[in-house]
Amino acid sequence: MPENAPEHVHDLLIVGAGPVGLALALALKDAGLDIVLADARAREAVTKDPRDLALAHGTRLTLQGLGVWDGLPSTAIEHIHISHQGGLARTLIDAAEHDLPALGYVASAGALAAALRKAVDAAGIPVFDETEITNVAAGEDDVIASLTGAGRPAPTLRARLAACAEGGLRAGDPNVVEHDYGQHALIADVQVAGGHRHTAFERFTPQGPVALLPKGNGYALVHVAHPDTADELLALDDAAYLARLQAHIGGRARLTGVGPRLRYPLVLRYRRSTIAQRTVWLGNAAQTLHPVAGQGFNLALRDVWALADVLLKESEATARRSADAAARPFDAGTAAVLARYANARGLDRLGTIRFTDTLVRVFSNDFTPLRHARGAALFALDLIPPLRNFLARRMLFGARAWP
């Protein structure tokens, strides 16, 4: 659109064309809404994202519904072995016990983004790559987004609703709750003798969890430690680091090699409210969680599905109420619409945040009474199937055992 062309008002502006933003656009492709996406990154930067995502079974169902699951490279997790260092107790969650083909999957964020982008392009939904949204000003009837970058279609863009799916969780924002865990996560690919047998390991240590997730023929590693310890671990050569990691894991798997190690600090951040005037925040723009139990993207996709469901139902209701839909168009950004979304997501969102936060606080310390309590809890999970089933469904489907 030429920069001097008159602006029109889109129904929905999605800020961020990563997996979360693209999934929202795709979920609404048949809603008859005027949708556009903008992302500051080049397309290739999104579709070649090397990070790994832990996808729960519920997330697989959603991706199947969106038509992007088939052909997506992924590795199934059929068993999850949970234990804690310094105790004999452990528990095993098995997919067959829940009549599922797998408890979850590991997939590349870039591969998922590529599959979603292909489907969004096929649906004819515009995506403005290399377009940064520098400001979103919400008014009574619409939002006005200021754009910059090589791909911007115009200096500004107007929409009834802005859905922010990337960034925006700033320290010091009074609407943002923040807790620094005093931990760093080291991530790497790890090779294993004899294959992974589709078994994931979650090993709790006093400094934080060590997780091995099946990926290809080896494992994706998430090794949580205190920042000073992370410095030491990064300074080790591969053989020395592998020996340290093997000591954590014990004889559960024989590790034979490790790839390049990266690190990032672990901080819980979440918005007290995910809605404001004509604005909604999703995914990492709404909350960033500790990687324990791999809940971050799964929670984000449940947010996406719920928002799409509310917008679809409200759009259909508006059409039924109006004899002339063109004269009374659906407004996606009204306070009533956003309140319905927030009410629908409150329990699962806060429940998931508290679930992961509690796991970290209870299992990442060496306080003796808690160490004994952890052992007792793992014994109970192993001996009481209904309790184990509750935990499994919580991880698979969220606080409401969704869907």
Image: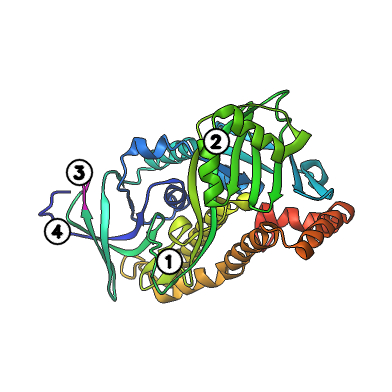
Q: Secondary structure at mark 3?
A: loop
Residue at 73% in and 55% down: 393
Say whether marks 1 and 4 touch (CB < 8 Å): no
Position of the C terminus, as image quadrant, is: bottom right
* Residue type at tag 3: Ala
Prevalent SS, magenta region: loop
Mark 4, Cα crowd under 10 Å, few <14 / some 14-19 / many 20+, is few
Which disc, if any, is residue 150? 3
Query: In the rendered structure, which disc, 4 or 2, sits on the residue that comes first in sequence?
Result: 4
- Residue matched to label 4: 6
Q: Is residue 351 above or below residue 75?
A: below
Q: In the image, which residues are magenta?
A: 148-152
Q: Is residue 121 magenta?
A: no
Image quadrant in which you'd find residue 375: bottom right
Q: Position of residue 182 (x, y in %)?
A: 54, 58
Mark 1, Cα crowd under 10 Å, few <14 / some 14-19 / many 20+, is some
User: Is residue 149 or residue 288 the one in the foreground?
Assistant: 288
Query: In the rendered structure, which disc, 3 or 4, sits on the residue that comes first in sequence?
Result: 4
How far, Cα to Cα, is label 1 from label 4? 27 Å
Residue 215 horizontal side relative to residue 269, left or right = right
Query: In the rendered structure, which disc, 2 or 1, sits on the residue that comes first in sequence?
Result: 2
Q: Position of residue 114 (x, y in %)?
A: 44, 36
- Residue matched to label 1: 319
Q: Secondary structure at mark 2?
A: strand
Q: Is residue 336 above or below residue 129?
A: below
How far, Cα to Cα, is label 2 from label 1? 51 Å
How far, Cα to Cα, is label 2 from label 3? 34 Å
Q: Which-is-in-front pick, marks 3 and 1?
A: 3
Residue 122 horizontal side relative to residue 265, left or right = left
- Residue matched to label 2: 188
Residue at 34% in and 38% down: 43
